[in-house]
Image (cartoon, rainbow, N blue to C red):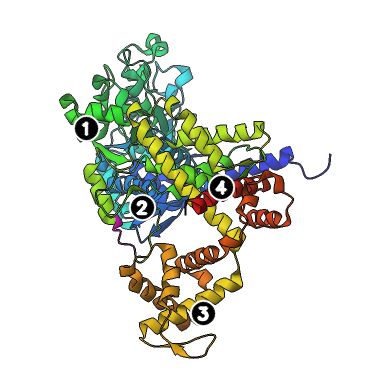
Amino acid sequence: MTGDIETLEQLSTEYKESMPADLRETKSFDWYLEAVYDDPKITRNAHQRVADMFDYYGTTYDETEGVVEYQLASEDPLNDGENTFYGTVIHQSIHEFVNKVKSGARRLGPERRIKLLLGPVGSGKSHFDKQVREYFEDYTMHEEGRMYTFRWTNLCDVIKDQDPADDTVRSPMNQDPLVLLPYEQRQRVIDDVNERLDAPYTIQNEQSLDPESEFYMDKLLAYYDDDLQQVLENHVEIIRFVADENKRQGLETFEPKDKKNQDETELTGDVNYSKIAIYGESDPRAFDYSGAFCNANRGIFSGEELLKLQREFLYDFLHATQEQTIKPKNNPRIDIDQVIVGRTNMPEYKDKKGDEKMEAFNDRTKRIDFPYVLSYEDESQIYQKMLNNADVPDINVEPHTLEMAGLFGVLTRIEEPDAETVDLLSKVKAYNGEIDEGDDIDIKKLREEAEQTAEIGEGMVGISPRFIGDEIAEAIMDSKHRSRGFLSPLTVFNFFEENLEHHGSIPEDNFETYYRYLETVREEYKERAIEDVRHALAYDLDEIQRQGEKYMDHVMAYIDDDTIEDELTGREQEPDETFLRSVEEKLDIPEDRKEDFRQEVSNWVSRRAREGEAFNPQDNERLRRALERKLWEDKKHNINFSALVSANEFDDDERSAWIDALMEQGYSEGGAKEVLEFAGAEVAKAEMED
């Protein structure tokens, strides 16, 4: 065996270094009190800790959208970017969620509400919820996120009927050690540490001890004649508390099981029947703190498909949110401290929203919409992430494949615009950031119109990324079975068309509309394919530079109402309007908008000149595109299009050069041949029609 291998010693050392240094240590209450004064943040509540967690992993600010992007979602540093989120609308949702948590940290109200993530299937809400829990686990492992709880020790020395197996008992609710102090004394400590606290919130802790701990405290205080110091020194140990979802510590996920047989004890805990014989039924030591709310204390409660729960079962959430307590059967109320997150899909939300008997519950929720991505390039990154995270066969994903798949998905999610000047495809492109300076498109107005026409919000209906991802996967495997080493948009389109009606979550009423959208995407791809072939067949950097300089000379003369020297005769002449329009028409710039475009490129050239940059039409996307198309128009009559579509001329030198040029754009050899045949046939057909 050659090469470096991991040894057990190396793996063990790495693991040990990743663990908190004090994870296995026990501390005294005196130590904890001093630690709180040194670092008041160790006694934060759940909302404050979760809020700080989002900032801990880094933030960036999108000034254009006014949105904070949290890097645990936008970059996923723990997993090297494996689980990143794409799309402005998603980061807006995450920004809104964090704002609610931060408001809760300041006790502005959301700390007493359920954060309800609402969205269609496959919109990313479950993925985000899971990511938050994963990062909370990691955060509590770090010094910045540390928290502590306590355990009772040597109980059998004082409490005569204490089961020897319970001589040491961990705080059942993993409460903060400060709750061991009586309220008046505790509040004095809190007032002191708040003066030392550097944070946008203040420390608060008005909780009571859980019933079992209250029982021990009463017994021990009676034994020591109310000497609290003796109790805490002789019977309390402080221990590090790390959130762990698998151990159900500080994190809990709750999923509805049988709708007809739901038991509130799943949330609040139940009698510990093994202890009844020892302590008796009414003894607080005979209670099992295994309910979901108990396990989530000090951290995050995550309720999956929350609104599928029976109405009566949801009543437990009223106390859990508004009063921050739970009420187990035949037991006192128990204080809780946690961020309660719920997730639900559209049908359940509509059902519960229309139920008058759910008014109290609905009033205690803060809805955060998780719509589908509305930028098709962002959507394509979701599919690229899927491919990056998978064991993809050796196959080349051809240019435009994922973008066109994303375009189809986004078309199904966007509200049809009302404005006569903007069609659906133009709106989609605007949402994708494809707006030129001369375009008369107001994105803000489009969004406002969509919010008024959408039932809940734009992007809350349509085709799921899961459907599109599944069809991409099928298309990949089909390509491999047919020994095609590439995946093209044409193959993906075929799978969309074949399987659209087989997908259970797509309403039958939408089939006709979605087929129409698919044809729109085919047309868009046709234009892009022809553009790529045009680039390969007629691209000439020197000629584009020359034509660009000529265009700008005539534009400047036109703007300055001046003449220009003729290249051949040397005589002064008026700007060549025919030449100028031959360039501008390649961008579909109408006669009445030509001056706006000319002024636009003139301003661009002037800015470049002031910055000491030489003129290069390649640096202006619109001008480059116009010049390329004009060059293609000038040259296409000399191109043998039959060679593009003929399978018998693959060895032709000219055809090989075209294939090489396309491969430089990212095509595989097979994909280049396919796009040549496809685009060549389309151009030849257009030529015949002309």
Residue at image point 34% right, 51% down? 427
Task: Give the residue pinned by disc 4.
Answer: 681
Circle 4: element type: helix
- Residue type, label 1: Asn
- Residue type, label 2: Ser
> Where 330 falls versus 494 (above or below)?
above
Looking at the image, is mark 1 or mark 3 nearer the viewer?
Answer: 3
Name the N-terminal-most of marks 3 and 2: 2
> Where 411 falls versus 56 (above or below)?
above
Seen as rendered, the residue at the extreme bottom is 571
Name the N-terminal-most of marks 1 and 4: 1
The span from disc 1 to disc 3 (Cα, nearest Å) is 59 Å
Task: Give the residue pinned by disc 1.
Answer: 362
Where are the magenta residues, as a range? 439-443
Horizontal side of residue 99 vs 14, given as left or right: left
Name the N-terminal-most of marks 4 and 2: 2
Circle 2: element type: helix
- Residue type, label 3: Glu
Task: Give the residue pinned by disc 2.
Answer: 426
The answer to if 482 sits in the magenta stretch is: no
The span from disc 1 to disc 4 (Cα, nearest Å) is 58 Å
Circle 1: element type: helix
Horizontal side of residue 441 vs 503, given as left or right: left
Local crowd size for mark 4, using a 10 Å CA cut-off: few (<14), some (14–19), many (≥20) = some
Looking at the image, is mark 1 or mark 2 nearer the viewer?
Answer: 2
Image coords of residue 296 (percent x, y): 38, 32
Residue 613's disc is: 3
